[in-house]
Image: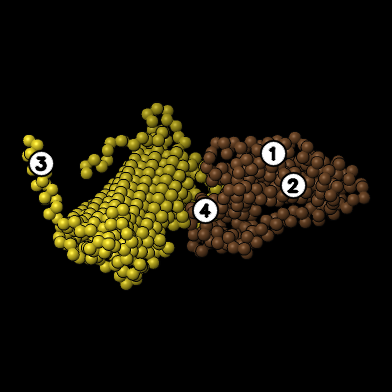
Chain colours: A yellow, B brown
Amino acid sequence: MKKWLFFWMLTQLAQITRATLIEVCPDCNYCTPGEGILSAEAGDTVLIRQSHYYETNILIDKPLTVIGENYPVIDGQMLDHIITVTADSVVLQGLQIQNVGTSFIEDRAAIRVEKAKYFQILDNKIFHTFFAIYLAHARHGIVRSNTVIGQAVDEMTSANAIHAWYCQHLEVSYNEVARHRDGIYFEFVDHSRIFENNSHHNIRYGLHFMFSNNDEYYDNTFRNNGAGVAVMFSKTIQMRNNLFIDNWGRSAYGLLLKEINDADIVHNIFQRNTLAIFVEGSNRITYKENDFIRNGWAVKMHGGATQNHFSHNNFFQNTFDLTTETNGIDNSYNDNYWSEYTGYDLDRDGRGDVPFRPIKLFSYIVNQTPEAIVLLRSPFVGLLNFSEKASPIFTPTNILDESPFMKPIPWNQSPTHDSH
Amino acid sequence: MNKILKYSLYDLIRSRWMFFYFGFFLLFTLGLFWLSPDLSKVAISMMNIILILVPLIATMFGLMYFYNSREFTELLLAQPIPRRHIFLGQYLGVAGSLSFSFLLGMGLPFLFHGLFTSAELPLFLTLLVSGVLLSFIFSGISFYIALKNDNRIRGFSLAILVWLMLAVAYDGFFLLLLSYFKDYPLEKPALALSIFNPIDLSRILILLKLDIAALMGFTGAVFKKFMGSQIGMLIAFIALLFWMLLPVLGIRRASSKKDF
């Protein structure tokens, strides 16, 4: 029995070692990652030992596994692209790639994947780059556990941390992306999943969808970005269990929906954003079991939104819960908890007996005359809101919650993403 | 004048109303700090008190003091002292003791919480300074009204009316004007309108120091730019000084003409 086991192990070992291991270090046969990769055969593993390499334009055009030991530094010296992948099944792991300069002519990136499939970009550290990871026409790839930190100053001279263009079936997970223009950018990207990422301090958006359909993002944190997430011109996007926090500033929001159809927004927490959700021209959207905590505006609906259904959400201490010009068509705000609600519940069924009107007179006025915001926190405005609440005259009468909850609604704790 | 000021200041500081006023601010501020660890919430609650209660109490107290010390004032008038010294001395005594109680009542808790060494110092200085300025402004106004009206009921109702106008009704007119002219760019008129009312001006100066200012969007940005500039600060300060000086000049004029 032992003999057989030994024999079996030998054959296994032979299988593994058939792929050659190529070592790169200043004193090895191959002194730079580029040399090592150039001389490797398809299927080989290139092991890069810890050192500081200055190199640009490394082309990977065969299936390779490139592994860094203790994060060897590949430094682009602000010159050009660093690694370009054009072959399928390439693995890049454990590298520290840094210093890609700004270019207004080409999209320079630390790692660029072009027309490749089944790639894996794992556990790399990418600092101070223009684009960090750039995926074009790529499919079935994984970008996981990378740390990407840029030094973006303004939108014009900076680019995105993880940028995907015309891709399908991507997984972007467990990454930390910060201080770029957009943390994660998807344009024409379908059937992809984004989860457990931490996107913060990006100048424009933490996560940005353009023309991307059938994607989902969940369990992410978007903190302190110009705006947390912008979803534009996309269909069937699932947004679950995300935390939108501290996206605070004059034109900052947690989540921007523009021309979105058929989306589900479930179990998210929106906390301390100037504007938690800004909705423009979006249809058939379900907002369920989200918490809106101490935002400036919780929800702002702007023209042409139909069938937006808010239910079982908790609204805690937002300066304005809802602002909208018209009710649109078939939008509903029933069955939510509003901390502003002062009604009573005589039959003790947990629901208030009088409807709640989420639009305050002052938010209505501010919507009409934005300059009136200078009267924020004025005693007169308090008086005005109170009298309007007692007998509504100006605010739209058809925007109301018919059966507001008396107490905060606990989320239905069924696992929401067990299907993966 | 100094002697009169000293007498009325000593007299007032020992009065139980001043202790009450001091105690109210002390307890209120301590209570707020105790209830909420969130500085910005504490600041907003304090702002509400400063904007409504401080002017109201300064108005009431100025009137009460003037009417109650009328006999003493008549006695003083018989002495060889210039009239304006008597009345300005009394006014400064009232305003000074009100400000003193306010500063001590709100400032001591700030001191305990180490705010004078924290990054929030500008915010809390703005709170304290606007409280003091409002005390001076509204006690001055009430003194002027009291000088002009011997009838106490008339005096009280006029003073209350002025307070109501500045604290509440002004914002109503403001809002009406804004919504009437909403088709025009209104940032600059809004800026001008809010400088003309000391209560609005204080409110905006405080709000701009809070993170809630982000809600004010473009209009807030215009305000912040203006108030952040040296010229803007100067104009705001001059506007508040103007509000302080106006009643003082009124008191001088009225006191020299008044027939006792």
Q: Which residue is labeled 3 in the image?
A: A6
Q: Which residue is labeled 2 in the image?
A: B95
Q: Residues within 10 Å of mark 1 (few under 14, many from 20)?
A: many
Residue occupying image coordinates x 84% and y 53%: B84
- Going by the picture, which residue comes out furthest to the top? A347
Q: Residues within 10 Å of mark 4 (few under 14, many from 20)?
A: many
Q: Position of residue A219 (x, y in %)?
A: 32, 45
A321 or A171: nearer the viewer: A171
The amino acid type found where label 2 is placed reads: Ala
Circles 4 and 1: CB distance less than 8 Å? Answer: no
- Disc 1 is attached to a residue of which chain? B
Circles 4 and 2: CB distance less than 8 Å? Answer: no
For the question of whether residue A10 can be seen, the reply is: yes
Q: Is residue B21 left or right of residue B38?
A: right
Which numbered mark, 3 or 1, is in the foreground of this view?
3
Vertical placement of residue A181 versus B50, above or below: below
For the question of whether residue A259 can be seen, the reply is: no
